[in-house]
Image: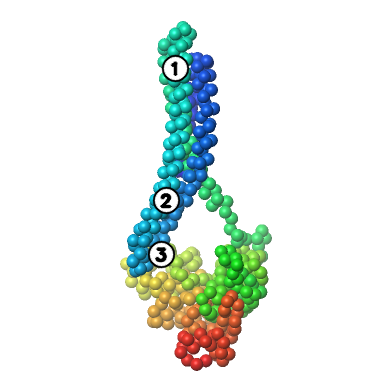
Amino acid sequence: MEQVVGSSASVALRNLVTGIGGIFYLFALSPKLAGLLLIGIPLLFGPIILFGRKIRNLSRASQDRIADVGTNVSEVLGAMKIVQAFGQEGREEARFADTVERAFATARTRMRLRAVMTVVLIALMFGAIVMVIWEGARDVAAGNMTGGEIAAFVFTGVLVGGAFAALSEVYGDLLRGSGAAGRLAELIAARAEIKAPASPAVLPKPPVGSLSFEDVEFRYPTRPEEKAVHDLTLHVAPGETVAVVGPSGAGKSTLFQLALRFYDPQAGRVLIDGVDVRDADPAAVRERIALVPQETVIFAASARDNLRYGRWDATEDEIVAAAKAANAHDFLMSLPEGYDTFLGESGARLSGGQRQRIVIARALLRDAPLLLLDEATSALDAESEAAVQQALERLMTTRTTVVIAHRLATVRAADRIVVMEGGRIAEQGTHAELNAKGGLYSRLARLQFDVAA
């Protein structure tokens, strides 16, 4: 695309003017010979039509193969330690070489077809010029043209032929660019499935902080045959702390995906402050939620900017207060430039626990009425976890909180514990009540605490 817009356009304009001007001059010199020369021009469309479609398809395939190379490099570099830990350097080298070879093979085929098309076009053009020279020589012999006129005609014909040959090169560039343009057009034409309604409902002010799931059924688009959530009904009251526990794949994180309206359920409703999230503007819904995801996300920016991502207009005092509450202030101040230290790509300069504390501080800074914690302390050492847990408990007293946790020790103090299994709510109650029931929670508790229910 860059070459087409930058250089090919100017080359095409220059040669188009040269070709058209040359044709007018040829007619001025000899209408007969110019007519013979132009008869051959329609023959040029044959190879253009024959090769053009194939080159365009190969150009698009070449773009896809180049994208595969970039994806492979990004994936391996991001998981370099895992690759080295499992001794898979050789396999990854071979996989990268295979990806590059496939990209090169596609590009090579495209270049060969383009070269053949160019050769055929040039051969046709200069074949026409040879024919003109033959006819011109006969006219000179008959006294209808002078030697100077035929020389001028041949010279101009060569210029015209060269101009149209250059245009065929530009056409090849256009075919290559059309492959990239087609892919870009697909991306531009893509529309988000989740969008605001034409007249979005207004969420109540001040925020209430309630969250409800009513008869929700949901399947992920990538797994339409499998229900992630079955007929789930759950009401979280304002100011309540609800812990969601259960085995992996039970549908715990799916609740957060639906609350944030990353997906819409196939049946049922999800309500924030009594308003169906499908009736509200997604941005307005997300403004009322602070999320601490299971996988920490650190941007290639300073520590301060990573914290401010929670609320960009936060003051310096608010940023520091959030960092202190998340037990991140001390290690941030120990960095070479303090809060202005560049953290590297994905927070490469930080440990896992430090990255998670920054993510927690970011959520604290957002100061939203609804707090979603997905294994918020999973990467912290015991001392840091205790400090952060205290900060989170203080935060929970002033807002609605939903906590996803595998370690039951972190949720025993919750107002209510919801146990999920197979996308359904298996049981719910307090820690003591669930232990007394002897159900799934009791079994999980015995496994983790090694005590009888």
| Position of residue 326 in the picture relative to residue 288 (left or right) | left
The amino acid type of the residue labelled 1 equals Ile
- Name the element at disc 1: helix
Position of residue 323 measured from the top left corner of the image (x, y, whole percent): 42, 73
The amino acid type of the residue labelled 3 equals Ser
Residue located beneath label 1 in the image: 133
- The mark found on residue 228 in the picture is none
Position of residue 39 measured from the top left corner of the image (x, y, whole percent): 53, 22
- Name the element at disc 2: helix
Residue 341 or 46: which is nearer the viewer?
A: 46
The amino acid type of the residue labelled 2 equals Arg
| Position of residue 283 in the picture relative to residue 296 (left or right) | right
Q: Residue furthest top?
A: 143
Q: Residue at x 41, y 54 (%)?
A: 99
Residue 331 or 353: which is nearer the viewer?
A: 353
> Which of the 4 quarters of the picture holds residue 424?
bottom right
- Name the element at disc 3: helix
Position of residue 140 measured from the top left corner of the image (x, y, whole percent): 45, 10
> Which of the 4 quarters of the picture holds residue 259?
bottom right
Query: From the viewer's perspective, is residue 393 above or below residue 29?
Result: below
Q: Are marks 2 and 1 in contact (CB under 8 Å)?
A: no
Q: Residue at x 44, y 46 (%)?
A: 106
Q: Residue at x 60, y 67 (%)?
A: 225
Among the two numbered marks 2 and 3 on one chain, the one whose residue lies closer to the N terminus: 2
Residue located beneath label 3 in the image: 346
Q: Residues within 10 Å of mark 3 (few under 14, many from 20)?
A: some
Q: Is residue 183 visible?
A: yes
Q: What distance separates the C-alpha of mark 2 from that of mark 3?
A: 30 Å
Residue located beneath label 2 in the image: 102
Among the two numbered marks 2 and 1 on one chain, the one whose residue lies closer to the N terminus: 2
